[in-house]
Image (tube, helix red, strand yellow):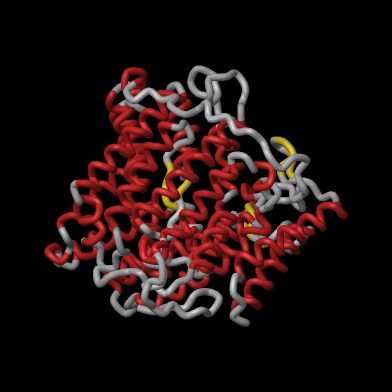
């Protein structure tokens, strides 16, 4: 299969020319070393925010004993950032070398918040990370037994397409929210409109202009078939942001709790760093207690926490790798990417590794689609991304100069192109169209890939049941639909069992 990258380059299979080419199947997948490097760079720049954001989420939350990650009485964000970048780098390189797939991994957003505010608040950080390690090991067993792959093979083709489309809409929405184009309504309690356009119903501030310029520049370069359009757009927008900040002195959007600058920069203030290198401290590695949480809060409560983590991790990666594979033109007749088993093994190990390093479960990132859009088709791109994450443990000041507004235009562009797959769904057949619709809309509206997948599975099974077509649903899909019902009803279940 030949496809076209976002820059208009055709992916035409060729015979390998050297050892590197043969190892990664670069020519056979219609790519080049240059495109793989560009793709790896773009993926890194679109997800490097996790190095800054993860410490802000898990590094600033105290556990049940009032301690922060690392055991101190005050946050140590540098400690968390170093471990976050280290695990992301090692596991992304592992994905590239072992699975040969252009998919990067890092601490999972949403999962880290759940660990910080729902689990660690009831036990020590070491106990909480022990549950994360256990969840990763359970998923690894499910992968090695073939159960995880079997479940996804049981999913109808149209629902797989819906998952890819939903993820495309989701990452476009992430891009718009992070750039401040879509914002939470500050007066949401007095209006039925929860979000709005820009600040006060209009686009305001220089950071917004940087986003718009970056987005339009990428679009223009794409239609002009400029090689490296996304990477050039990110770098150009970052340079523009640094210039704007040096002249206007805008500052960050978040000043302190309760005080927000609506015209400020998201995540990072773009300015040249005072120093370019900083020695990392990996002191968080190995600070976990595998069974400590079970003794502290009881078997039932711990089991429910592990189940919640497991179900979210289980399907996020299944949907992500399929969406990436579809965009790269790498799916087989069953709608699965090459080396599926290896991809899932790496992802499972990454979940456990994230817990073992005290940075929460690591998972596959849909932002990898930006690298695929730049032409990445092989694991070489992941190796490039992983190496950059490892370098980021020393170059944290450099990573911290890229604001949301400079990186998020890539997500919007990628989201659009992923949504083009929507034509593969039969909208005249309500039995598949309704589950597909719920899958697509609930991913961005709930900010969760797993919720969208779960809603699609449950509604599909229910429709088939009431239509008397029970036998048309794969047995594994019935099991998974039932598990999602438990997942969605986890709060009342906890109350009934008295473990809330």
Q: Residue furthest front?
A: 18
264 and 281: which is toward the camera:
281
Q: Please report the residue visible at 56 percent of the width from the left and 36 percent of the height from the top.
A: 82
* 359 displayed left or right of 219: left
Which quadrant of the figure has residue 85? top right
Compared to residue 83, the image places residue 14 above or below, namely below
The quadrant of the picture occupied by the C terminus is top left
Q: Please report the residue visible at 29 percent of the width from the left and 58 percent of the height from the top.
A: 340
Residue 286: x and y in percent read: 43, 26
Which quadrant of the figure has residue 362? top left
Q: Residue furthest bottom?
A: 224
The quadrant of the picture occupied by the N terminus is bottom left
61 and 324: which is toward the camera:
324
Residue 433: x and y in percent read: 33, 71
Q: Please report the residue visible at 49 percent of the width from the left and 67 percent of the height from the top.
A: 33
Q: Is residue 442 visible?
A: no
Q: Please report the residue visible at 69 percent of the width from the left and 66 percent of the height from the top.
A: 214
Q: Residue furthest left?
A: 471
Q: Is residue 16 visible?
A: yes
* 473 displayed left or right of 107: left
């Amino acid at each position: 299969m030949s496809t076209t990258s976002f820059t208009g380059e055709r992916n035409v299979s060729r015979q390998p020319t050297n050892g590197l080419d043969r190892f990664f199947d670069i020519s056979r997948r219609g790519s080049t070393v240059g495109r793989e490097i560009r793709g790896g760079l773009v993926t890194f720049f679109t997800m490097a925010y996790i190095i800054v954001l993860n410490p802000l989420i898990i590094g600033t939350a105290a556990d049940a004993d009032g301690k922060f990650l690392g055991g101190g009485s005050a946050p140590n964000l540098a400690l968390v950032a170093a471990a976050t970048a280290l695990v992301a780098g090692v596991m992304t390189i592992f994905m590239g070398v072992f699975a040969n797939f252009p998919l990067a991994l890092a601490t999972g957003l949403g999962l880290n918040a759940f660990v910080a505010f729902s689990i660690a608040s009831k036990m020590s950080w070491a106990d909480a990370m022990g549950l994360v390690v256990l969840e990763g090991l359970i998923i690894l067993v499910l992968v090695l037994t073939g159960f995880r792959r079997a479940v996804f093979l049981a999913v109808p083709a149209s629902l797989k397409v819906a998952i890819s489309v939903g993820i495309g809409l989701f990452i476009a929405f992430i891009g718009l929210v992070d750039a401040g184009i879509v914002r939470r309504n500050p007066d949401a309690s007095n209006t039925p409109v929860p979000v709005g356009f820009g600040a006060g119903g209009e686009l305001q501030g220089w950071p917004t202009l940087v986003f718009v310029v970056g987005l339009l520049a990428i679009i223009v370069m794409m239609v002009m078939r400029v090689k490296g359009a996304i990477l050039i757009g990110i770098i150009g927008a970052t340079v523009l942001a640094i210039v704007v900040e040096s002249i206007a002195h805008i500052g960050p959007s978040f000043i302190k709790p309760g005080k927000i600058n609506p015209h400020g920069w998201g995540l990072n203030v773009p300015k040249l760093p005072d120093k370019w290198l900083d020695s990392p401290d990996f002191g968080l590695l190995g600070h976990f207690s595998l069974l400590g949480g079970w003794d502290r809060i009881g078997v039932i409560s711990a089991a429910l926490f592990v189940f919640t983590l497991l179900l979210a991790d289980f399907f996020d990666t299944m949907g992500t790798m399929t969406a990436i594979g579809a965009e790269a033109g790498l799916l087989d007749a069953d709608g699965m990417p090459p080396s599926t088993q290896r991809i899932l093994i790496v992802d499972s190990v990454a979940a456990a590794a994230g817990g073992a390093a005290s940075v929460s479960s690591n998972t596959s990132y849909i932002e990898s689609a930006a690298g695929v859009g730049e032409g990445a088709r092989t694991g070489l791109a992941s190796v490039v991304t992983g190496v950059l994450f490892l370098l980021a443990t020393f170059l944290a000041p450099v990573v911290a100069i890229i604001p949301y507004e400079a990186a998020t235009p890539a997500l919007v562009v990628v989201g659009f192109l992923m949504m083009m797959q929507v034509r593969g769904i039969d909208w005249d057949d309500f039995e598949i169209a309704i589950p597909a619709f719920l899958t697509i809309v609930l991913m961005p509206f709930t900010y969760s890939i797993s919720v969208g997948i779960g809603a699609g599975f449950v509604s599909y099974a229910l429709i088939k049941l009431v239509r008397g077509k029970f036998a048309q649903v794969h047995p594994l899909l019935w099991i998974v639909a039932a598990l999602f019902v438990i997942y969605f009803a986890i709060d009342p279940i906890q109350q009934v069992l008295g473990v809330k």
